[in-house]
Amino acid sequence: MSSLVDTTSRTDILNRLKRAEGQLRGIQRMIEEGEPCLEIAGQMSAVRKALDSTYVRMTVCFMQQELQQRLSLAESREDELAAVLADVQNLLSKVR
């Protein structure tokens, strides 16, 4: 299985995870401070959406890397693949 080789994608995914980590710390603080359950649930929902979005991004990055490598695409075709996968990412983000 491949790993993330594209530094831009890797940075994007790491930044998304760091934001989610910060949100989780905020939820822990909210629980410790006795915040209302509805507010905590709202923040939990936001973290779940952030992680879902990050998962979709990771999946699309994997697909792009694997398809480029296995199909040995010319650079002009890589742009076409990137456009199709951007559409796939957009479609998958609407599923949630």
Image (cartoon, helix red, strand yellow):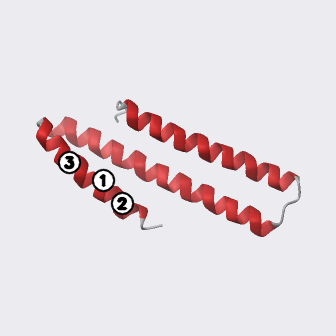
Q: Based on the displayed image, in which of its 4 quarters is residue 2 positioned?
A: top left
Residue 96 x/y as whole percent:
48, 67
Secondary structure found at label 2: helix
Residue on which disc 3 sits: 81
Q: Earlier in the sequence, mark 1 or mark 3?
A: 3
Please rate how many residues cluster around mark 1, counting C-alpha atoms within 10 Å: few if below 14, some from 14 to 19, many from 20.
some
Residue 48 x/y as whole percent:
59, 58
Identify the disc placed on residue 62: none
Q: Residue at x 48, y 49 (%)?
A: 54
Q: Amino acid at mark 2?
A: Asn
Horizontal side of 93 relative to 50 (left or right) equals left
Identify the disc placed on residue 86: 1
The relative height of residue 6 versus residue 35 in the rendered view (above or below) is above
Residue on which disc 2 sits: 90
Secondary structure found at label 1: helix
Residue 65 x/y as whole percent:
28, 38
Determine the CA span between mark 3 and mark 2. 14 Å
The relative height of residue 28 versus residue 13 in the rendered view (above or below) is below
Determine the CA span between mark 1 and mark 2. 6 Å
Whether tag 1 and tag 2 are in contact, CB under 8 A, the answer is yes
Horizontal side of 52 relative to 70 (left or right) equals right
Please rate how many residues cluster around mark 2, counting C-alpha atoms within 10 Å: few if below 14, some from 14 to 19, many from 20.
some
Q: Quadrant of the N terminus?
A: top left
